Image (cartoon, rainbow, N blue to C red):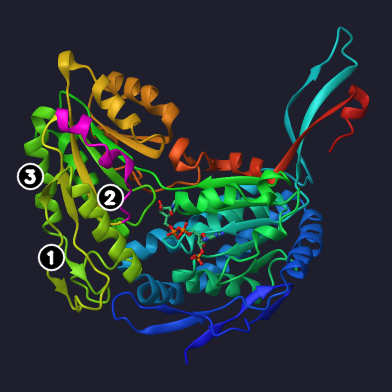
Amino acid sequence: MTELLPNHFNGTWQTGTGQGTVLTDPVLGTELVRVDATGLDLAAGFAFAREQGGQALRALTYVQRAGLLAAAQKVLQANRDAYYDIATANSGTVKNDSAVDIDGGIFTLGTYAKLGEGLGERFFLADGDSARLGKDPLFQSQHVLTPTRGVALFINAFNFPSWGLWEKAAPALLSGVPVIVKPATATAWLTQRMVKDVVDAGIFPAGALSIVCGSSAGLMDQLQPFDVVSFTGSADTAAVIRSHPAVTQRSVRVNIEADSVNSAVLLPGEAAGSEAFDLFVKEVAREMTVKSGQKCTAIRRVLVPEELYAAAAQAISARLAKTTVGNPRNEAVRMGALVSRAQLVAVKDGLEYLKTQAEVLHDGSAAALVDADANIACCVGPTLLGVRNAAGSDSADRIHDTEVFGPVATLVPYRTTGGSMDHAFALVRRGQGSLVASLYGSNPQALAHAAAELADSHGRVHIISPDVAALQTGHGNVMPQSLHGGPGRAGGGEELGGLRALNFYHRRTAIQASTTVLAQLQ
Ligand code: NAP
């Protein structure tokens, strides 16, 4: 039998008492390890984290906690090779794609370590300046942010077992709030291994970092009023989290990062073969294939002026045709596997669903696999769909509603009557709120105008103009300095954005007092 991974909970390493769920290699089909949370004393583990972990973290200043993050970053860096091996085996990703998750997570942790250094040897933060409450300036109101005295429960998605942990844990731990992470079962191994390395290094106080692998049953029931829960995953599970009594009755603060039908928009006036057109084509093909399209930020809708539909279809397809798919251990392979058989089925089903309203411009289903058995490997080539004309973009509702979580995108032509982008904006907005939209063009005024038009329905607008071609960080790359999250169907959450991320883990309070008292607030 394969190894049963222990959970770190209630200050100790403990294996579940059940048989466990087997994690598999999505390329070879082999069994890797098992995870199980049966028999854990959830009430005791949550109390231990909340009381022991929380108290010990809050006894440290922001600068001291930043030091712990930096130490954890070093431990993770020293063990990178092991993480790449786990990612190859359990996620089926090629090295570059594993890097997005592993190095992206380590980089984010390091960024918060640096940001924390600037917060000072303090135990809470001032929020803005004080404001006088009447004519006499002696009595004023000063807002402060103090770390919440609860735990942060993270329920994470399968596609980012490393980054998904550290992009949440870094701001939580820096804030002084203990973390309990429940990774998605399919890829829990990498999260478990990283937590193990950091816990075994003895960096954080007991109870600061816990991990429960396996079933989520009962976790939400443990949450109390000062706890917070941060969820990343599908809209369906998000609805379950939102309607849990912990949220509806006990006011547990919740952050939701759900699915998103993100767009890329080529602005009018950019001819086929122009610099902006080529940057657009390159980014769309890259986004479709990085991590086999299993990124919440991946481009799903590709908007082009109607007259450029054929040229864009041809150029993107030509790039996709060069994508070699198969076993990530083979150097010739550029795109590895989907994470599981279930995801492969979901992607195929999703494609069939979209195809009822779209034509196939590049067919990935026939792609020959390199070094992989098509009967076993969860691999599929990239597929570009398209709706032939602007009227089709209006009538095809499925392309605006459906996130196929794989290497799939749809070309969506828009009308540019009089050079207007109104039709493009209306089509983008049919995504009902997304994590990110990217804009491609060479006219700064038009790009800025489009960004302002789309900002309210997106967490991030990424603009690629020729002057930043070599500098831009990528449509789908989430940088810790920038906000991650989106309104509407994207979940309505907010993560990262530099120090803004700390707000979620702090309570804001107005202290009303004499200026002499306020001056004593440290
Ligand atoms: P999922 O099926 O919703 O699972 C997400 C997490 O919720 C997993 O840890 C899962 O555990 C857990 N879970 C399942 N049922 C639950 C319940 N009743 N109560 C509490 N937790 C429960 O999502 P996924 O398939 O892992 O992830 C893919 C989706 O995530 C995509 O739609 C993608 O767009 C989205 N995503 C969004 C972001 C973002 O930042 N916005 C980032 C990454 C992914 P088990 O694994 O044990 O079932």
Residue 109 left/right relative to 129: left
Residue 305 is at least partly visible in this image: no
Given residues 33 and 115, the one toward you in this image is 33
Above-or-below relation of 333 to 255: below
**Residue 367: which disc?**
1
For marks 1 and 3, the one nearer the N-term is: 3
Q: Is mark 3 within 8 Å of ligand 1?
A: no
Above-or-below relation of 169 to 471: below
Q: Is residue 173 magenta?
A: no
Residue at point 53% right, 81% down? 20
Residue at point 18% right, 42% down? 357
Where does label 2 land, which residue? 287
Q: Amino acid at mark 2?
A: Glu
Q: Position of residue 281 (x, y in %)?
A: 18, 43
Q: Position of residue 436 (x, y in %)?
A: 38, 39
Q: Tell me which segment is drawn in magenta.
A: 390-405
Where does label 3 land, which residue? 314
Q: Is mark 1 within 8 Å of ligand 1?
A: no
For the residues marked 1 and 3, what is the alpha-carbon distance in whole angstroms? 17 Å
Given residues 27 and 162, the one toward you in this image is 27
